[in-house]
Image: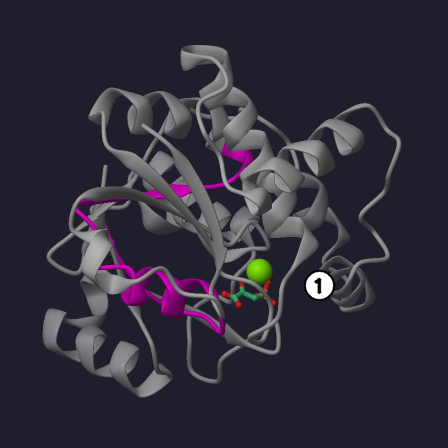
Amino acid sequence: MRIDVHTYTNRFADNKLHSCTAIVIDVLRATTSIIRAAQNGALKIIPTKEPGDAASVAMNIGARDCVLAGERGGIRLPGFDIGNSPLDFSHELVSGKNVIFCTTNGTQAICGMSGAANLLIGAMINRTAVARRAVELGQDIVIMCAGTDGRFSADDICAAGAIIDAIYSFVGRIPTDDCGIVSHLLYRDWLENRIDLDSTLHCSRLIRLGFGDDVKFCFTPDVTDVVPFLKDGVITV
Ligand code: 3SL
Ligand code: MG
């Protein structure tokens, strides 16, 4: 077993995906929101690439049974029920509902990795649980960081390192590529308060937009054991 970490711009060769467990991370904020929706009883979460696709899926299922969620530029899409604040995916709103979800980077990365043998949704809030599940599946692990607007994003790399740290705690230091090694170092520095990610591209943008509480929640380790997974285009637990 080995671990490779990729950013969405540096995609894993598709022909190897079918024999790997992929963990997709968009810690700010899409995968954190998906995990919280699953934790709060959403029946299923359907990731889509374009707002129009999300609206059509919701129309086919029936608006009463759906929560339409998504953002562009971090802001709720017009006509959508909620944006992409994990704190909005409450039990009252999503329990028993289908969440149709469209975000700038996160849902794109999930859809792009659908060829993996197993596709798990990871973030800081489920880091130990997602690591345990990936180890149990016994295949090579590819961590795909969604990044921000096609660019490397330190928040995702730090969360990747958090998951790698948990994987190492289960199976020891298995072979890991350079991006994985650096992710792990970044996470250890962050954990031991040697660095602060607030000034990085996506953190600072969200804080400026008034989503500081989301940033705090997204960086809280091990809030839940829920590990959503994608099968046939649908995310469930
Ligand atoms: O790009 C995404 O998928 C989002 O998570 C970005 S934002 O946090 O809503 O800005
Ligand atoms: Mg992000």
Q: Is residue 146 above or below residue 166?
A: below
In this view, 225 is above or below 91: above
Give the x, y percent position of residue 153: 65, 60
Say if disc 1 is inside 8 Å of ligand 2. yes
| Residue holding disc 1 | 202
Find the magenta span and give its range. Answer: 96-125
Query: What's the residue at 59%, 50% (across, down)?
Result: 156
Residue 112 painted magenta:
yes
Left or right position of 199 against 95: right
Q: Is residue 59 visible?
A: yes
Can you tell which quarter of the image residue 41 is in?
A: top left
Examine the image and state in which quarter residue 222 appears: top right
| The stretch drawn in magenta includes residue 51 | no
Badge 1 amino acid: His
Picture coordinates of residue 49 (x, y %)?
A: 33, 77
- Give the image quarter of residue 99: bottom left
Image coordinates of residue 25 in percent, x first then y, are 47, 49
The colour scheme applied to this rendered structure is: one colour
Along the viewing direction, whichever of 174 and 207 lies nearer the viewer: 174
Indicate the secondary structure of the residue bearing disc 1. helix
Question: Circle 1: is it few (<14), some (14-19), or many (20+) Cα within 10 Å?
Answer: many
How far across and how far down the image is residue 124, in percent? 56, 36
Task: Please tell me which residue is depicted at 29% across the width and 35% down the height of the picture.
Answer: 140
Q: Is residue 185 left or right of residue 65?
A: right
Q: Is residue 186 left or right of residue 228?
A: right
